[in-house]
Amino acid sequence: MQDDNDAEVFDEDAYRQEVLLSAGGIATAQRLDGNVGYLDIRTLHDANVAAPIASAAMTLLAGTDVLIIDLRRCPGGSPLMVAHYCSYLFDDPTHLNDIYDRPGDQTRQFWTAPSVPGTKFGGSKPVYVLTGSATFSGAEELAYDLQCRGRATIVGETTMGGANPGRRYRIGPHLQLSVPQGRAINPVTGTNWEGAGVGPDVDVSAESAFDTACGLALEHVLTLGRDGGRRAVAEDAEAARDRLGAVRR
């Protein structure tokens, strides 16, 4: 049993500073050549603190033709932040996940929001999610939620396989034990990714995932035509595809 004297004290001010210093857990939010959006998420911080930063990043990328979400170096985080990101990727309210809490014998549902700050990317344009062996917990949920709804193509490696939330108990001066106290329940599959991980739709090494997804994204952009402003986009996409092909050779 955890002693109250051993309980970790949460410093809200320090946490808010951590979120700001890490740009809300976002390493990169960038429009790549060919009008491809790229979002590299390193942490899914508490949505109550980091949601405005995530909204700014998603609004920046809303006009891109394809979105690549990189979760290869994301160890997880808040399910509320998962729902916040997903809210920009669906047109209608969508049931994403349930989490059953065993001590309270309660189940909490997680849905996309009916409206969001800024501009949505939308529910029809392609999304690619990059995964690796270090993708864990809430990052796995983001990949799994999008995959199960047919909203994203997963590119990379099978993830670590941590779906069931738990609590840490101090059992010694220098040792803590993490004990699962609940489970995630996907409304589509009725199960989760615990132990098995999230399997990719395109199975490549984590190191190759970005180039693979970029190639797929650029091929899609080139199907969208060359009328009006799309001419410059298509030319950029062709040049980017050629550079990518040269690197692969």
Image (cartoon, rainbow, N blue to C red):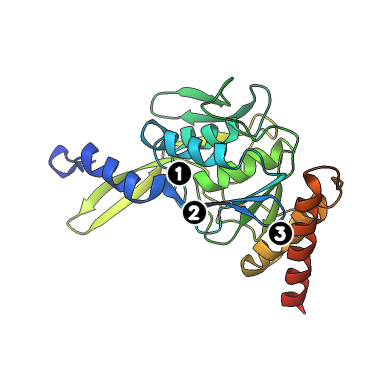
Inter-mark Cα distance, 3 to 2: 19 Å
Position of 11 relative to 246 (above/below): above
Q: What residue lies at 86% left-to-right and 43% top-to-bottom?
A: 227
Q: Is residue 222 visible?
A: yes
Position of 94 relative to 226 (above/below): above
Quadrant position of residue 181: top left
In primary-sequence order, the first of circles 3 and 2 is 2
Q: What's the residue type where badge 3 is placed?
A: Cys
In the image shown, does 183 or 39 lie closer to the viewer?
Answer: 39
At mark 2, the secondary structure is: loop
Residue 122 point in image, percent of width and height = 68, 32
Q: What residue lies at 70% left-to-right and 38% top-to-bottom?
A: 148
Name the residue beneath numbered marker 1.
44
Q: Residues within 10 Å of mark 1 (few under 14, many from 20)?
A: many
Outermost residue toward the left?
Answer: 5
Q: What residue lies at 87% left-to-right and 46% top-to-bottom?
A: 225
Position of 169 relative to 34 (above/below): above
Q: Is residue 11 visible?
A: no
Q: Are marks 3 and 2 in contact (CB under 8 Å)?
A: no
Q: Residues within 10 Å of mark 2 (few under 14, many from 20)?
A: many
Residue 231 point in image, percent of width and height = 81, 50
Residue 211 point in image, percent of width and height = 69, 65
Inter-mark Cα distance, 1 to 2: 8 Å
In the image shown, does 64 or 176 lie closer to the viewer?
Answer: 64
Q: What's the residue type where badge 2 is placed?
A: Cys
Outermost residue toward the front?
Answer: 228
Name the residue beneath numbered marker 3.
214
Q: Nearer the viewer, mark 3 or mark 2?
A: 3
Q: Nearer the viewer, mark 1 or mark 3?
A: 3
Q: On the rendered structure, is 240 left or right of 167?
A: right
Q: Are marks 1 and 2 in contact (CB under 8 Å)?
A: yes
Name the residue beneath numbered marker 2.
74
